[in-house]
Image (tube, grey):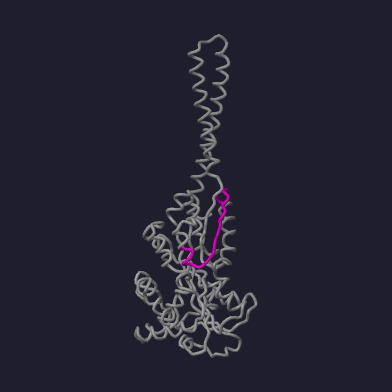
C-alpha cells in the first residue's frame, strides 16, 4: 500500500467501524423499547404507550438508515465508454484490469460498456445524446472540443488530466503492396499519377484529419507555401477513389479486400495487422505529425449518472504503467515516462515531428480546413472535377 492510500484506508476503516457500532447500539435500544412496550400494554396508559411506540419507530428508521448506507455505497456501477475504432484491442485488455483492481480496492462491481467507431461520428452521437458517454477516448482533441462546445464537458478539461488530456499517441504510416510496385517512399510520391490510395473521411474519422494535416504540413511546414500545399493535397485526393468512414474500414478495405496500392493509417494499426499475420511493407515518414489521442469525462453525463468517482478513477488508470504497457503492446506510443523508456528501442524517434500547435492549434485548424466550405471541401470539389 502506498503512503497516499493509507489515510484513505484508515478513514474508511474508522468510518465503517463507527457505523457498525452505531447500528449495533441502535438495535439494542430498539429491542429494549420493544420489550418496554409489551410491559406497558399490561394496564398502562395509552399516552405512555404512544410515546414509546413513536420512539420505537424512530429507532427502526435509524437502524435501517445506518445499515442501508453501507450497502448503498456498494451498488454496482455502470460506465459508458465511447472511443474511436482502433482502440478496441487495447481497451479489451485494460478494462478487465481496472474492474478487477476497483473490486479489490472498493468491493464494488463495475461494468464498462464500450462502443467504437469513427471519432468524429462518435463525438456527434455523444453531442446528440444517442450515446450518453461517461468517458470519451477519441482520436483527436478537436472532437473533445466539439463536445465541450455543446455544453457537455466543462472548459479547461485538458488541464484536469495528465499530459494535457492526451492518453495515447501514434504517428502516420504509409503501407504499400508487397514489393512496393508503385515505389512509394515519401509523402510526395502519393501525388503520382496512377496511385490508388485508401483513406478515411475527415468528416467522420479522426485518422482522416490527422492524415490530411500530415499531407498539408509535409509541404507547408518544410519550406513550401500554402499554394504549393493546396496543389499537392488536391493531387493526393484525386488518387483516393472512395473515402471510408473510419480507420478500421480503411484497413479492412486494404488488407482484407485487397483494394488500393497505398494505405495511410496509424503506425500502431499497421503493426497490429502485421501481428495478425499480414506481412506488408510500410514506411513511417521522417517528416510526420504527432497523432495525439485525448481522454475526458463527459461532465454532464457523469453527474447525471452519479458515476464521477469511478469514471475519474478509470481515466487515471489509463495513465498507469499497467495500462500504458497494454497500449505499448499494440504499438501506440505511450505517454507514461516509464513505459516510454521501456519501448524506446522499438519505437525510434521521428526526425521532424510536427504537432497541431505548429499548424495554429485546433480552433484555427477547424476553421481553416474542416468547416463547411473550408479548404478540405474545396480540395474535394477540385479532386472530383
Can you give x and y, in whole percent of width and height, for residue 164 in the image? 41, 65
**Can residue 7 be seen here?**
no
Q: Is residue 254 visible?
A: yes
- Segment tinted magenta in the rendering: 104-123
- Write the residue at 44% across / 85% down: 235
The C terminus is located in which quarter? Answer: bottom left
Q: Quadrant of the N terminus?
A: bottom right
Q: Residue at x 60, y 89 (%)?
A: 179
* Displayed quadrant of residue 328: bottom right
Q: Quick one: which residue is furthest to the right in this view?
A: 277
Residue 244 location, x and y as percent? Answer: 52, 74
- Is 117 part of what is drawn in magenta? yes
Q: Nearer the viewer, residue 88 or 198?
A: 198
- For the point 57% across and 53% down, the residue is 111
| Total numbered labels | 0
Answer above or below: position of 46 versus 256: above
Q: From the top left corner, tell me how far across and down residue 67 is, in percent.
A: 54, 36
Most foreground residue, 189 or 231:
231
Measured as percent of width and height from the top left, residue 83 is found at 51, 64
Q: Residue at x 38, y 57 (%)?
A: 151
Q: Nearer the viewer, residue 282 or 127?
A: 127
| Residue 37 higher or lower than 288, as above or below | above
Residue 234 drawn in magenta: no
Task: Name, please, the residue furthest toward the top.
Answer: 43
Q: Which residue occupies the foreground of this view, 87 or 70?
A: 87
Give above or below for 263 relative to 310. Answer: below
Amino acid at each position: 500500500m502506498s503512503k497516499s492510500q493509507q489515510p484513505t484506508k484508515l478513514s474508511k476503516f474508522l468510518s465503517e467501524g463507527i457505523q457498525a457500532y452505531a447500528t449495533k447500539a441502535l438495535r439494542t435500544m430498539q429491542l429494549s423499547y420493544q420489550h418496554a412496550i409489551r410491559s406497558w400494554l399490561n394496564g398502562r396508559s395509552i399516552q405512555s404507550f404512544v410515546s414509546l411506540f413513536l420512539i420505537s419507530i424512530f429507532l427502526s428508521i435509524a437502524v435501517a438508515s445506518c445499515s442501508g448506507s453501507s450497502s448503498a455505497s456498494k451498488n454496482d456501477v455502470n460506465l459508458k465508454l465511447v472511443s474511436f475504432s482502433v482502440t478496441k484491442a487495447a481497451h479489451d485488455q485494460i478494462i478487465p484490469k481496472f474492474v478487477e483492481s476497483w473490486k479489490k480496492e472498493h468491493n464494488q462491481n463495475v461494468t464498462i460498456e464500450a462502443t467504437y467507431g469513427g471519432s468524429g461520428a462518435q463525438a456527434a452521437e455523444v453531442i446528440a445524446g444517442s450515446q450518453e458517454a461517461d468517458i470519451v477516448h477519441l482520436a483527436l482533441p478537436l472532437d473533445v472540443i466539439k463536445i465541450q462546445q455543446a455544453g457537455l464537458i466543462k472548459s479547461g478539461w485538458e488541464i484536469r488530466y495528465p499530459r494535457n488530456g492526451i492518453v495515447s499517441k501514434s504517428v502516420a504510416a504509409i503501407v504499400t503492396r508487397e514489393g512496393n510496385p508503385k515505389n512509394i517512399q515519401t509523402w510526395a510520391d502519393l501525388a503520382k499519377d496512377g496511385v490508388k490510395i485508401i483513406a478515411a473521411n475527415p468528416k467522420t474519422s479522426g485518422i482522416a484529419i490527422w492524415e490530411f494535416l500530415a499531407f498539408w504540413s509535409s509541404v507547408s511546414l518544410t519550406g513550401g507555401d500554402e499554394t504549393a500545399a493546396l496543389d499537392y493535397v488536391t493531387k493526393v485526393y484525386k488518387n483516393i477513389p472512395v473515402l471510408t468512414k473510419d480507420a478500421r474500414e480503411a484497413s479492412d478495405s486494404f488488407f482484407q479486400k485487397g483494394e488500393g496500392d497505398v494505405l495511410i493509417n496509424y503506425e500502431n494499426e499497421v503493426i497490429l495487422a502485421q501481428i495478425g499475420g499480414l506481412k506488408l511493407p510500410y514506411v513511417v515518414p521522417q517528416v510526420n505529425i504527432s497523432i495525439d489521442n485525448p481522454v475526458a469525462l463527459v461532465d454532464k453525463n457523469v453527474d447525471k449518472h452519479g458515476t464521477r468517482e469511478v469514471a475519474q478513477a478509470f481515466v487515471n488508470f489509463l495513465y498507469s504503467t499497467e495500462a500504458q504497457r497494454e497500449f505499448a503492446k499494440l504499438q501506440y506510443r505511450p505517454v507514461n515516462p516509464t513505459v516510454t523508456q521501456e519501448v524506446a528501442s522499438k519505437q525510434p524517434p521521428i526526425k521532424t515531428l510536427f504537432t497541431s500547435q505548429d499548424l495554429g492549434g485546433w480552433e484555427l485548424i477547424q476553421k481553416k480546413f474542416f468547416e463547411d466550405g473550408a479548404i478540405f471541401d474545396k480540395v474535394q470539389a477540385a479532386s472530383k472535377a
